[in-house]
Amino acid sequence: MLNRQGRPSASGDAGAVDHPTFTGNRALQVEEALIFEIGRHEVTGVDIDEPKDFKSKLGALERTGDIGLPGLSEPETMRHFVRLSQKNYGIDTGLFPLGSCTMKHNPRLNEKMARLPGIGDIHPLQPLSTVPGAIELIGELGRWLCELTGMPAVAMTPKAGAHGELCGMMAIKAAIEARGEKRSIVLVPESAHGTNPATAALIGYQVVSVPAREDGTVDPEEVKKRLSPDVAAIMLTNPNTCGLFERDVVAIADAVHAAGAFFYADGANFNAIVGKVRPGDLGVDAMHINLHKTFSTPHGGGGPGAGPVVLSKALAPFAPVPFVVVEDGNARLVENTSDAGDAQPLGRMCAFHGQMGMYIRAMSYMLSHGTDGMRQASEDAVLNANYIRASLTDLMSLPFGNRACMHEALFDDTWLDGTGVTTLDFAKAMIDEGYHPMTMYFPLVVHGAMLIEPTESESKASLDLFIAALRDLALSAKRGETDRFSGAPYHAPRRRLDETRAARSPILKWTPPKPVQEAAE
Ligand SMILES: *Cc1c(COP(=O)(O)O)cnc(C)c1O
């Protein structure tokens, strides 16, 4: 059926076909049009007097045509955006099992701290003398990050994990150049996150892949075979993207260092080992920390993240400006390369001082948990992932045998062989059950991968319900009930979308539809 916008009904499920509604809405599930479709140019939500004696200084540059922005009244605006927000599935709505992305609860205390007027209202262009507390907080958070990782220095400014990788790898490049050497190769295990090879390639390195062994970890012998005086670094994730601890990490670090190369650790999975293992003790030279994964600052939808990079003694001098120096308990900001003394900063990673709001949330998380609380969060995250693994192994297959995992459980699609159901179908059917799908088809080394990370946020009751839902779906797939999967999601506002086309040829500009009569001809 067509709804009132003349679009096919949002719903394709049998119930809606049997009982079409006049509006196209289904109870509280309201079909929300684009703001351009409902807004009118002549409407505005505010009522301000025309300015008196207004003289434009723009001359010929003044806009004379219609700006074309859609206007709504205040209640219409409110409804539009509230309805859109209700279409979002987020960590505040339900379990969010994305692996590698670590969607954990964002404590409200963190939010409250970030909104304190003395913090929320400051501006990066304010004179430094008016914000000593903010500088001190950046220094203090950096100290905690160094303490937790066992590393001597940290570059706070990178704004995301990938940005931290760029910063760390630029520091490595600078250190190699300062030695008067030229090295052109970076080793990256094949299970790595795509940002690792992308970072290396972006700054001009040739990426050489290291295969995973049978058990999903990196073989130090395979690393050694590829080491040469031309290798600048290895980029290794630990725990890796298969949710496994790289047990030979020290041997790998030793071999890399013996070849004069550096060890970049992708710290996106640090939340599995906080308070248990210090990366500095494993021989790491640089590692980014995704505050938005490990330390509970909100993320998703490209929202603000923060990716501080801890650095070894050898790399510390190359840390970018601005950075905080704490001397005799006094924190001071070094803003310019020329004020950096003996250090040789690689430049700067961002215009201002980094993601202040995320620093405050992360600091608040750390202080409210304490070291024992953070250690317990890691332990609970690992326990929860193993509970899921153990509760599903009789139905779903594990690529690397039934071994304990770290913070995420990785299944492959061998168990779906012959059922006519794919990983994608299974994930879409999870949406009908009210769950955000797990990470699918990543890591690439595992066929039809399904990577589930429950985090420590979930209670046993919530895990049990999730497991029961997955078991029901798995049994249904094995019984050959392909209908439940092939057209899923049936109950979502939109059905199976062409995600490839949406990514490859997105339509980013709204063009007004033709008047109805014309379209009907
Ligand atoms: C999330 C992630 C990244 C990238 O971090 P962003 O903050 O999204 O830029 C890199 N590596 C791994 C393993 C990740 O999970």
Image: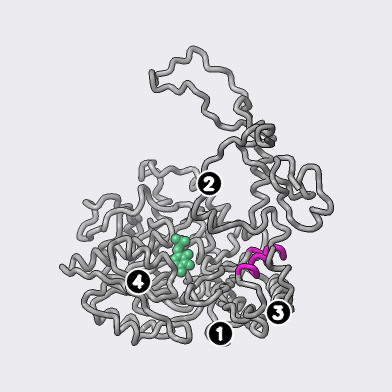
Q: Quadrant of residue 520?
A: top right
The mark nearer the N terminus, 1 or 2, is 1
Mark 4 → mark 1, Cα distance in angstroms: 25 Å
In the rendered image, the residue lying farthest to the right is 19
Crowding at dot 1, Cα within 10 Å, few <14 / some 14-19 / many 20+, comes out as some
Identify residue for label 1.
404
Q: Determine the secondary structure under disc 1.
A: loop
Measured Cα–Cα span from mark 3 to mark 2? 39 Å
Residue 486 image offset from top left, x and y in percent: 68, 66
Q: Classify mark 3: helix, strand or loop.
A: helix
Identify residue type, mark 3. Answer: Lys
Q: Note whether residue 368 is visible.
A: yes
73 relative to 99, above or below: above
Q: Earlier in the sequence, mark 2 or mark 4?
A: 4
Q: Amino acid at mark 1?
A: Ala
- Taking depth in this image into account, of 294 and 510 the one nearest to the observer is 510
Q: Quadrant of residue 432?
A: bottom right
For this orientation, the residue located farthest to the front is: 521
Helix, strand or loop under label 2: loop
Query: Is 428 part of what is drawn in magenta?
Result: yes
Q: Assign a secondary structure to mark 4.
A: strand
Residue 299 appears in the rendering: no
Residue carrying label 4:
264
Q: Which residue is mark 2?
A: 507
Residues tagged 1 and 2 counted as in contact (Cβ below 8 A): no
Q: Earlier in the sequence, mark 4 or mark 1?
A: 4
The residue to which callout 3 is attached is 478
Start-end of magenta stretch? 424-436
Mark 3 neighbour class, 10 Å CA radius: few under 14, some 14 to 19, many 20 or more: some
Distance (Cα) linking label 2 and label 4: 38 Å
What residue is drawn where x is 70% and y is 57%?
Answer: 492
Give the Cα separation between the discs numbered 1 and 3: 25 Å
